[in-house]
Image (cartoon, rainbow, N blue to C red):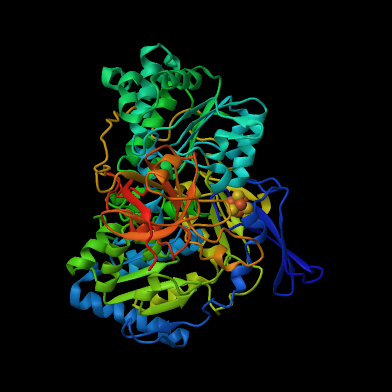
Amino acid sequence: VVELGMPNRTVLTTCAYCGVGCSFKAEMRGDEVVRMVPYKDGGANEGHSCVKGRFAFGYASHPDRVMKPMIRERITDPWREVSWEEAISYTAQRMRDIQDRHGVGAVGGITSSRCTNEEVYVVQKMVRAAFGNNNVDTCARVCHSPTGYGLKQTYGTSAGTQDFKSVAKADVIVVIGANPTDGHPVFGSRMKRRLREGAKLIVVDPRRIDLVRSPHVEATHHLQLAPGTNVAVVNAMAHVVVTEGLVDRDFVAERCEGFAEWAAFIARPEHSPEAVEQITGVPAAELRAAARLYATAPNAAIYYGLGVTEHSQGSTMVMGMANLAMACGNIGRDGVGVNPLRGQNNVQGSCDMGSFPHELPGYRHVSDDAVRTVFETLWGRTLLAEPGLRIPNMFDAAIEGSFRALFVHGEDIAQSDPNTKHVTAALSAMELVVVQDLFLNETSKFAHVFLPGTSFLEKDGTFTNAERRINRVRPVMAPKTGKHEWQIVCEIAQAMGYPMHYDDSSQIMDEIAITTPTFAGVSFRKLDEVGSIQWPCNDAAPEGTPIMHVDGFVRGKGRFIETTYVPTEERSTRRFPLILTTGRILSQYNVGAQTRRTPNVAWHPEDLLELHPHDAEVRGISDGDLVTLASRVGETSLRARITDRMPVGVVYTTFHHPVTGANVVTTENSDWATNCPEYKVTAVQVGLKQVS
Ligand code: SF4
């Protein structure tokens, strides 16, 4: 930490890394952060923090940061610094020109889960009201869109059921496709505390994550399944519950619908643990024992991550977990539930704020006349009743020629989205790419306009964490770029002829409260008074809602849905005999734009490829060797780490470094319901890299 002397003021704000949403006191001296002190009364963290929240804020003043807007006619031209007025009028005029020539639907925007609720809200409003279409999507498309779909279908709302605190009452904790100690460290610690007190742990993951075996914590069951077979595993657990008479009959009778049909489906022999063992590689006895442990515990809670959602059956798996929890009555009280661990700070919020092409804020479908009328009356524009394009559809339409311009808000899609070659072909095909971000990145290589963004230290607004907790993000300094991001968006909309103005970001939240019933009771004033609020917060729940579905599900009755296991099309072959799966590590963050630019901690300097000793030996690979990683769509190289964390036949890497560009090899396969990419299953080959 750079020594800057004693702080002379303190600002209470929220970490901008993961979906835990820890509160911090930023201790300031002038315009410099002296230190970030975890806030003891923070609703999500209660005084705890991890290395990123505590130390990784130096990127905000890194010399790489772009401070002036820039434009260029062609992507081969050098950037030219311009005034805000010129950048905004150039963007607006090019957007209008493209729409005149190619139609209203030829342009769109992507919102960011890194940004505040208020910033996201104005971006989707700009697309809907100023662009005049529903071509708005969010980077949550590539992470938790199946959560939104699956939990809405079964429970009626696109969000986790519990508050973090609830884990302290869990007797059994099931972690599926998540690595909380690396990805959500403060919640991971809370979970470990409960495990040390005696709660039992079931881990469902191809990789032996730290939780499986760490000091004072050992999983009772590690179901080390083959990548892509989650649905078969959850169906087998449900099969045991149904066929061994472990169903909570009172809960199901009072609270649910569709049980009889679902029970007949799940009792079929193909869902038995013995049959599923052939598919998943998980011993039938382990599956049976894990199911019994979950079903017979007084309280059992499921926590899951991208290892559930980023599959061709991501949405099916979310519904499968929801079925299992309902069958066992594990919903609606402390210590139970189905809980997504959101990766980025505001994944929940960016989805809540209407970033999907089919949903207005509050997860209401654009075809709902009554809902559209609310927005049309307030916004003074007629809105389209048909859904717009999802991100992958935008890419396909760009290559085909009908989608011509994209506004990318705070996301590096050229590094983070799958099948890099396809993404960059789409970006290259567009006439106009506008990037709003802190740093030039892989996406901005294809951009014509660069609008410098603000770090969390300059933002004024709110983030919503994985437990639906709305936290205030307070600025410790004015925007270094001269404008708030929401102001830039409003000014582009205005320059396109749509009047959009707010005096400050609290007015945006006031509008959200008017248009979005689950936020009806939220305001900056109330947040300042009470600290944080978990939505829904309205007349029915003025103090917010820590636990959902207590007396009834949001949709009325919880709905059992048949979840047929369908193998992914991605199979290992002779040419690509291994399966690659991906994840995060504690000391880096997503594409690394921030953590790679924070010099005060020994950040993990490169992505490594983990592989089993057997797979290494047959390829003549030693620990630390430079290896090639190739799939049917691309090839990259990185260093090998040999470890028995991985089973034979499965390799693993992270995606934090553009030099590696792990997504060069991931494919176009995606979730059937939401198009969330199947990052977690890619057939690959690994070999020693020949260095000439
Ligand atoms: Fe920030 Fe997440 Fe770490 Fe909390 S756990 S300090 S929110 S990165």
In the rendered structure, the answer to whether residue 425 lies left or right of residue 139 reads left
| Residue 356 to residue 99: above or below | above
Residue visible at 27% across and 53% down in the picture: 668
The foreground one among 263 and 413 is: 413
Q: Please indicate, yes or no, whether residue 251 appears anywhere in the rendered image.
A: yes
Q: Position of residue 255 (x, y in %)?
A: 42, 23
- Where the C terminus falls, by quadrant? bottom left
Q: Please indicate, yes or no, whether residue 499 appears anywhere in the rendered image.
A: no
| Residue 322 to residue 44: above or below | above
In the rendered structure, the answer to whether residue 661 lies left or right of residue 395 reads right
Q: Position of residue 339 (x, y in %)?
A: 49, 38
Quarter of image, res 480: bottom right
Residue visible at 42% across and 44% down in the picture: 617
Q: Position of residue 130 (x, y in %)?
A: 33, 70
Q: Position of residue 402 (x, y in %)?
A: 19, 68
The foreground one among 405 and 129 is: 405
Residue visible at 44% across and 15% down in the picture: 250
